[in-house]
Amino acid sequence: MLQVHHVSYQYEEQEAPALTDVSFSIRRGEWVSVVGHNGSGKSTLVKLLGAIMPLQTGEITIDGLPVTAENGYEVHGKVGMVFQNPDNQFVGATVEDDVAFGLENYGIEHDEMRRRVDAVLRAVSMDHMKTHEPHHLSGGQKQRVAIAGVIALRPDIIILDEATAMLDPEGRLEVLATIRQLQRELNLTVIAITHDLEETLEADRLLVMHQGRLVMEGTPEALFERGDEVEAIGLPLPFSMRMYQMITGTSKFVKDEELLEYL
């Protein structure tokens, strides 16, 4: 579905390239987490995937469509993005107005627009707050509204750009559960950009970025079994695995519920 071939990117004001010869592919319906510390190239990659910045070297295609400035309108119809700060995405006076904004820009007929707005607000459990002002919502609620606005456009791919970074633990779980449910129901492809490895345990695959390069790729279990390599590039292992190491003195891929067996 998504193909990235030999992509490199260099900012004029920086000596080192932001991305160097990055290649990978993502299948339809996959949940792929892209992880790395600050400066690893994650943000640049997001902007290129969403056609926010023009490619310099290499090629990105979605179902055969080249991701270019010339194809920006079509790309934005296929790729929806949810950013770290939902306040930066709000443009409507009410929740329902905000969700409808993108549909209006795409010229969706009014009755169809109303149907979509109502449907997506139900899907993210925010239909009871459709007349509220977005800025009065909690962090988790704001992100669910942002997600609704993206889903209303019926994209094939959703990119979460550190979308839970500003949320408390409850809000983070709330947003991730919402996305997971929508992914299953709509067969969405999800690309989650994060520095929090706790969020990656349920992903289908991980892409690990370091100094602008894709240095590791695989399932969470396969990568975290190589814990020493992950930590060597400055990424802490998930809490459950660190606790397991402390308790047993050995390394193993474990999730929170499995860790309880050893406590």
Image (cartoon, rainbow, N blue to C red):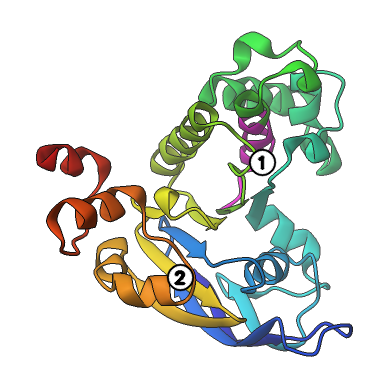
Q: Label 2 belongs to which residue? A: 207
Q: Residue at x 52, y 25 (%)?
A: 123
Secondary structure at numbered mark 1: helix
Residue 253 placed where, x, y %?
22, 59
What secondary structure characterizes most of the magenta part? helix
Q: Is residue 238 visible?
A: yes
Q: Which residue is mark 1?
A: 150
Where does residue 45 sit, x and y in percent of width and height?
A: 65, 71
| Residues drawn in magenta | 143-156
Tell me the kind of residue under disc 1.
Val
Q: Which tag is nearer the camera, tag 1 or tag 2?
A: 2
* Quadrant holding the C terminus: top left
Report if residue 151 lies within the magenta region.
Answer: yes
Q: Nearer the viewer, residue 103 or 228?
A: 228
Image: 25 above or below 89: below
The residue at the point 82 percent across, 84 percent down is 14
Q: Give me the disc on residue 121.
A: none
Characterize the local packing of mark 2: few (<14), some (14-19) or many (20 or more) Cα atoms within 10 angstroms: many
Position of residue 134 relative to residue 90, above or below, is: above
Residue 138 picture location, percent across and down: 66, 21
Instruction: Place residue 49 in its image quadrant.
Output: bottom right
* Location of residue 104 (image quadrant): top right
Q: Nearer the viewer, residue 140 or 3?
A: 140
Q: Inspect the magenta stretch and tell me whether residue 178 lies in it.
A: no
The residue located at (67%, 11%) in the rendering is 129
- How packed mark 1 is, by other alpha carbons closer than 10 Å (few <14, some 14-19, many 20 or more), is many
Query: Residue 139: percent from the left, percent from the top?
Result: 65, 27
Badge 1 or badge 2: first in the primary sequence? 1
Residue at mark 1 to residue at mark 2: CA–CA distance: 24 Å
Q: Is residue 119 above or below residue 221?
A: above
